Amino acid sequence: MSDNKDLTFEKAMEELEEIVQQLEEGGLPLEASLDKFSRGIELIKYCNDKLSETEKKIEVLIKEDEEIKDIVPFEEEFGE
Amino acid sequence: MEYNIDNIYSVSQISSYLEALFNTDKVLQDLWVKGEVSNFYQANSGHMYFTIKDEDAQLKTVMFRYKSKNINFELEDGMEIAVHGYINVYKVRGEYQLYADKIVPEGKGTLYEAFEKLKKQLKEEGLFKEEHKSSIPTIPKKIGIVTSPTGAAIRDMLSVVDRRFKNVSILIVPSLVQGDKAADQLVEGINYLNSRDDIDLIIVSRGGGSIEDLWPFNEEKVARAIFSSNIPVISGVGHETDFTIADFVADLRAPTPSAAAELAIGNREEIENHLDNLTRRLLHNQKARLKSAKDSLNSIANRRIFKKPEELFINKMQRLDELSRELKWNMEKKLSKSKERFIILNSKMDTLSPLKTIKRGYSITYDQEDNPVTDIKQVKKGDKVKTTIINGSFLSSVEQIEKDGGLDE
């Protein structure tokens, strides 16, 4: 439906908020409101994708003589 | 020098001479002196008098009221302080003394000055301006933390992350956070994170400590590294009451390391809740919208006209019957009227018909053009005329014309 290339999480949230507000105000013809709704669903999917893109991972940089040697899980190196 | 009446100075003279000496000495005119406070006394006038001393010496000090307003702590005996001012002669007593204009608790003396100076300089340069502050990303993909991997700060931050249990990725860049090498390592850490392309938020942090401990975060190179970082920087240094230069130049100042972690990922939690909320509202609204559309559709579909569509033309059918019956009736009426009229006309015709008259001996004469002769002028002598009687006709020629009232010829 719309081009999502320039979409960022922040922009998507903003647009989504606008859509929900418009729909809640009412007054849109049914067909237009269906279009808005499906755009809303699209944005929610985009945001959820962005949110789940990262996984929990805690790493630490290992340096030796000022040189970066490795990146290892933090627990492995400094865990109790 | 021999005793000579001409070479003797008065006390005032020699005091003035000393005063002039003091006044022209650069060191004495602008200096910091540190020591312990003793014999502190504040006169009713508001002026403060005390002595600063160390193990071997003491120095009388006065701070006049208009200067003492700048002190934001209570001076008391035994306190270690550093005092700024100039030294001059107090001729009345034949003493030299320190005329103070600034006092800071010692230990902080030079650092405090350096802090204030750098803060002022960077502020004037515009490094603290709001317009230079970038916004913190709402969902950082990967957070770079420059701190000691063994300090209290990282433990505090990781426990916040653990508690929140959010899928956030963190890269810790170990750095000394106190001592001479700390500033350089902090700068390196910030620059290293900027050289990567997967970091979208940086936290520089250390736990609480003395002003000396926190000092690396007050160094100009650290401030400049934070300022030129393309990645937004959160500072979380020391306790809530500690303010460092790093705090002023950072895009966001967190009062503590834990708070820095919370600002970095707490934000995300809020966003997730907000997104959930928007999703619920969108679905609810659409459901309600569809239901209401369906309801109005149903209410229209349930109207009588759709339930009993034949009613739409039943009436018309009836009316049609009525009309055709009326039409028929009217036609019949009209027809019978015409019939009557025909009979009347017929009988009239009968009485008017020339046949009856002809029967009585009258005849009709036609001229040469077969027109009935009704005017004498229609014929002239020699014309052939045809005369019809009841049972035949005969041709004759006109011998003579007789108009009423005389002969024509």
Image: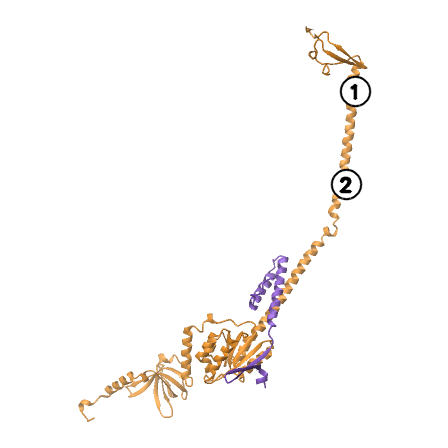
Q: Is residue B176 left or right of residue B22?
A: right
Viewport quadrant of the N terminus of chain B = bottom left
Tell me which amino acid carries mark 1.
Asp
Viewport quadrant of the C terminus of chain B = top right
Tell me, yes or no, whether the two marked residues, 2 and 1, touch with CB atoms within 8 Å. Answer: no
For disc 1, the chain is B
Which numbered tag is attached to residue B350? 1
Q: Could you tell me which secondary element the residue under label 1 belongs to?
A: helix
Tell me which amino acid carries mark 2.
Asp
Residue B393 appears anywhere in the view: yes
Q: Quadrant of residue B13?
A: bottom left
| Residue at 76% across, 10% down | B396
Chain A takes which shade in the image?
purple
**In the figure, A47 relative to A35: above or below?**
below
**Which label's residue is closer to the chain start, 2 or 1?**
2
Q: Disc 2 designates what residue?
A: B321
Q: CA distance from mark 2 to mark 1?
A: 43 Å
**In the figure, B262 relative to B93: above or below?**
above
| Residue at 74% across, 52% down | B307
Q: Could you tell me which secondary element the residue under label 2 belongs to?
A: helix
For disc 2, the chain is B
Q: Is residue B347 left or right of residue B138?
A: right
Q: Is residue A24 left or right of residue B91?
A: right
